Amino acid sequence: MPTHTLIQASEALTLAAQQPVLWLDARFELAQPQQGAADFACGHVAGAHYIDLEHHLSGPAGAAGRHPLPIAATLAAQLAQWGLGHAMPVLIYDQGAVMYAARAWAMLRWLGHTAVAVVDGGLPALQQAGAPIASGQTRLPETGNFSATTPLLRTVSATKIAQQLGQATAPLLVDARAAERFHGTPHPLDPRCGHIPGAVNRFFKLNLDAEQYFLPATVLHQQWQGCLNGTPPPQVVHYCGSGVSACVNLLAMEHAGLHGSALYVGSWSEWAADAGKPVANGAA
């Protein structure tokens, strides 16, 4: 049963019936940051704990971007408080928007946890599969023994990307934002518009079908091979607006068997805020 990228709702429920797991509810709304916690209180998979994009999965917004890396030890301690042990599977879902669950998946990988999977289709799929639903807050279990270990996810800094721009050793940068933002259409969140020079655009929603489920791994593999144009996966760096939706592209590549790409967490929110960083407009 897959527990390192995507898992189907029925498989997740079967796994949870067979052994202890940690359910994480990652629902969030960028325009209404309190909405996810409110939705969790109204109803969630029984036994789940709410993991908040801005409180748990990011550090304070600032020069490093809108959603920089959290403090590893702090996030690891929180997961342990929710009962996580080193060998325990983690099952993550959101409202079906994918990117919040994918960010949580990426941060667990960054902490070195292997058995972590996103539930394909999110909470709607789990409800359809008959998941037990509870309201209110989940009682804290016995503290687990989890702590951060060697990262399974590579992260890349703005400084490193800038140093390599234009060089033969430069990574292939894949921008997960919508095409209009990539091309330079003004956006209220962006102090400058466009993309990092040399980047290619792969909108994160292209990994999904009309019902917001991931495309089959074989289809994703073929599509991503075309996007990468021969670049080995370890030479790929994903970014987006603030390091959230890029995690969907990262997850899609891993699910497609294209392992080892990296994440530029600061993404455009960090890059564009630095007037010394170059910006490109139009098509790649």
Image (spheres, rainbow, N blue to C red):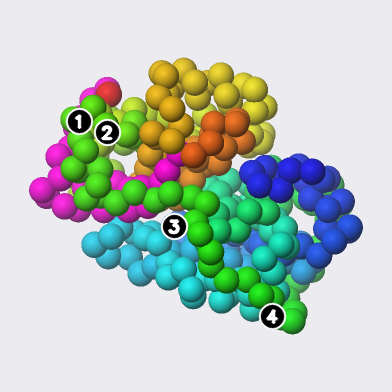
**Label 4 vs label 1, nearer the camera:** 1
Disc 4 residue crowd, few under 14, some 14–19, many 20+, Cα 10 Å:
some
**Badge 1, how many Cα within 10 Å: few under 14, some, many 20+?**
few
**Which residue: 68% across, 54% down?**
115
Crowdedness near tag 3: few (<14), some (14–19) or many (≥20) residues, C-alpha within 10 Å:
few
- Mark 3 to mark 4: distance in Å? 33 Å
Residue 166 sits in quarter = top left
Nearer-the-camera pick, 22 or 34: 22
Asked if disc 2 and disc 1 are in contact, CB closer than 8 Å, the reply is yes
Q: Which residue is mark 4?
A: 143
Give the label, 3 or 1, closer to the camera.
1
Q: CA distance from mark 2 to mark 1?
A: 5 Å
Counting residues from the start of the chain, the first of labels 3 and 2 encountered is: 3
Of pointers 3 and 4, the one earlier in the residue sequence: 3
Q: In this rendering, would 16 be left or right of 275? A: right
Figure quadrant of the N terminus: top right
Residue corresponding to mark 3 = 31
Residue 278 shown in magenta: yes
| Chain part drawn in magenta | 261-283
Q: Quadrant of the C terminus?
A: top left
Q: CA distance from mark 3 to mark 2?
A: 35 Å
User: Which amino acid type corresponds to the residue marked 4 in the rendered image?
Assistant: Thr
For the residues labelled 4 and 1, say whether their Cβ atoms are less than 8 Å apart. no
Compare marks 3 and 1 and give the one earlier in the sequence: 3
Mark in the foreground, 3 or 4: 4
Residue type (three-letter) at the residue carrying disc 3: Ala
Q: Which residue is mark 1?
A: 167
